[in-house]
Image (spheres, grey):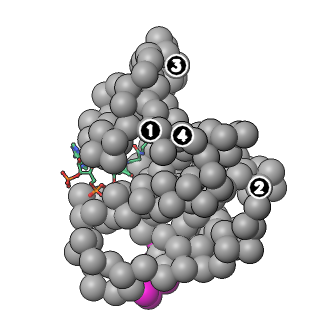
Amino acid sequence: MPEKDLRQDSAVSSQGASASDDLVFSPMQLKDLHDVYYIEQRVFPYHWTYRNFESSIAIENRGIVLRDGNGTMIGYFVALDIVDEMELLKIAVGKEFQGKGYGRILMDKVLELARLLEMESVFLEVRESNAPAIGLYKATGFKTVGIRPGYYVQPKEDALLMKLKL
Ligand SMILES: CC(C)(COP(=O)(O)OP(=O)(O)OC[C@H]1O[C@@H](n2cnc3c(N)ncnc32)[C@H](O)[C@@H]1OP(=O)(O)O)[C@@H](O)C(=O)NCCC(=O)NCCS
């Protein structure tokens, strides 16, 4: 497994997004959690706790953060690879950065990582009312493959199960 590559920071051109600075991806570490949690609380109605993120790092989920050239956190994702399938547990862009193409940039990184890990597919669950996220997933090629009734709480809501074959 090419672990070394995944641990290195990588820069990406911000072409396609509105930011002019270069963007930097890096593995999510404890030192990132203050910024991650700041975003998390503001974008999810029912969000992970700080401890959930600490545990996620401890069990070596695939967490990646995206910062601009000034070090400001733009967003992050957390994924889990199980045999040949990757589950995208979380993807988020800070409120002030939404709608500028960063979600797409993060999703491209998810798919790059999944291919690097030789996954055959990526799947996720999403609230059926979450139009921005569903829009992003459909635009990236995900298809709805099932519904999980009452999957979410606060507020209670069905989940769409979406999947992308790589
Ligand atoms: C979902 C989320 C990550 C999208 O990030 P973003 O940076 O705003 O998205 P982008 O600007 O890259 O847009 C990518 C695509 O998503 C879709 N999209 C984005 N905002 C949308 C909206 N308000 N309504 C419908 N579709 C939308 C579009 O298809 C868009 O492509 P287009 O610009 O070519 O039309 C972001 O809205 C977010 O963090 N939401 C809160 C957290 C969340 O719900 N995460 C997903 C569940 S785990």
Q: Position of residue 117 (x, y in %)?
A: 65, 55
Residue behind mark 1: 164
How far is mark 3 from mark 1, CA to CA? 21 Å
Q: Residue 139 appears in which quarter of the rendering?
A: top left
Q: Amino acid at mark 1?
A: Leu
Of callouts 1 and 4, the N-terminal one: 4
Of callouts 3 and 2, the N-terminal one: 2
Residue behind mark 4: 121
Residue behind mark 3: 151
How far is mark 1 from mark 4, CA to CA? 5 Å
**Is ligand 1 closer than 8 angstroms to the Cβ of mark 1?**
no
* Camera-nearest label, 4 or 3: 4
How far is mark 2 from mark 1, CA to CA? 23 Å
Examine the residues drawn in magenta and state their main secondary structure: loop
Q: Which mark is residue 60?
A: 2
- Are the residues flagged by discs 1 and 4 in contact, CB closer than 8 Å? yes
Q: Amino acid at mark 2?
A: Glu
- Are the residues flagged by discs 3 and 2 in contact, CB closer than 8 Å? no
